[in-house]
Image (cartoon, grey):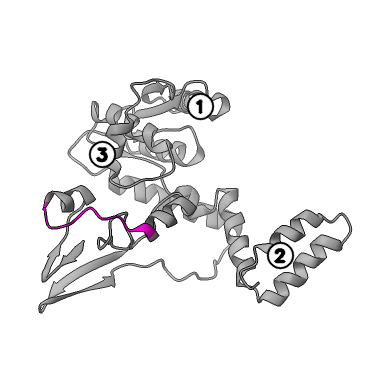
Amino acid sequence: YAVVGDVLVFASELKSLLASGLVGGDLDYEAIDAYLALGYVPSPRTPLRGVHKLPPGHRLIVEGGGYRIEPFWSYPEPHEAHGDEREMRERLLEHLDEAVRIRLMADVPLGAMLSGGIDSSLIVALMARHSSGPVKTFAVGFRGEGAVNELADARRVARAIGTDHHELELDMADQDTALAELTWFMDEPLADLSTLGFLAVSQLAARHVTVALSGQGADELLGGYRKHRAAAIADAWWRLPGPVRRAGVRGLAHGPGSMPQLGRTLRTTDPAD
């Protein structure tokens, strides 16, 4: 959305605001700087100056000649779990099963994106519980990527569950790779070419189904990536008072099995200095 004079312009895509003719194409260089550092443009910024996006879980309300932004949803407050590990596992599975079941209530053909990982494989298995016929599954891989190519894992899961499986394999060296098409759909830059595979597998799925479930976001929810844990540790580190961080670095630099170069590097990048 953007405020142009006394007019509020809003749309679901950045390109729609440009098509209105009311929003210019001037770049927001702070947003570009954030993209170069993070690999994406964090909300509420966009690459265009004066254009903002709503943060997740928020809505924009226009009334009385003005507007406001307010949250409509937030993560539930954490609470202490009750029961032993087995009970908690069963409860989690019940919630997942219910979440999948209610999303199968549709009058259109349904399917699932299948990578062969835990998240998408679990969703497909739960779909099979509630489906009268084989679940339609779709997978994509990149030729020459070795272990990163997940097609073999997806096939193994598809055979085990008995799905109606469809797949395709892309070649990043292919001059016909649809980067221009991807750019059109993405609207703003994202430093992750996995989106190219997701676009291709979505186009494949669209030839067979109208709705497809996926495991996107599950790793973030359940802390499945080591890089997320490392980011949390780094965030906690920088929240410590400067003297405490410097004392810790000196311990690293001069203690048994120390790495002096690491200590020097950390000290020179300390914002408190």
Q: Which mark is residue 103?
A: none
Q: CA distance from mark 3 to mark 2?
A: 43 Å
Residues at badges 2 and 1 in contact (C-beta under 8 Å)? no
Rendered image: mark on residue 267: 2
- Amino acid under disc 2: Arg
**Left of 245 or right of it: where is 2?**
left
Q: Which stretch appears magenta?
A: 20-29
Image spot of residue 33 (x, y percent): 43, 56
Amino acid type shown at disc 3 = Trp
Q: Quadrant of the N terminus?
A: bottom left
| Residue identifier under label 3 | 184
The image position of residue 217, as x and y in percent, is 43, 49
Front one among 179 and 79: 179
Res 126 → quadrant: top left
Indicate whether residue 23 is drawn in magenta.
yes
Seen at 50% across and 36% down, the residue is: 117
- Mark carried by residue 149: 1
At 45% from the left and 23% from the top, the residue drawn is 159
Mark toward the start of the polypeptide (3 vs 2): 3
Q: Looking at this view, is 213 or 190 the one in front?
A: 190
Q: In the image, which is nearer the foreground, mark 3 or mark 1?
A: 3
Measuring from the top left, give residue 74's x and y in whole percent. 37, 68
Residues at marks 3 and 1 touching, judged by CB atoms closer than 8 Å: no
First in residue order: circle 3 vs circle 1: 1
Q: Is residue 92 magenta?
A: no
| Quadrant in which residue 165 is drawn | top left
Graded by Cα atoms within 10 Å as few (under 14), some (14 to 19) or many (20 or more), the crowding at tag 2 reads some
Check disc 1 and give the amino acid type. Asn
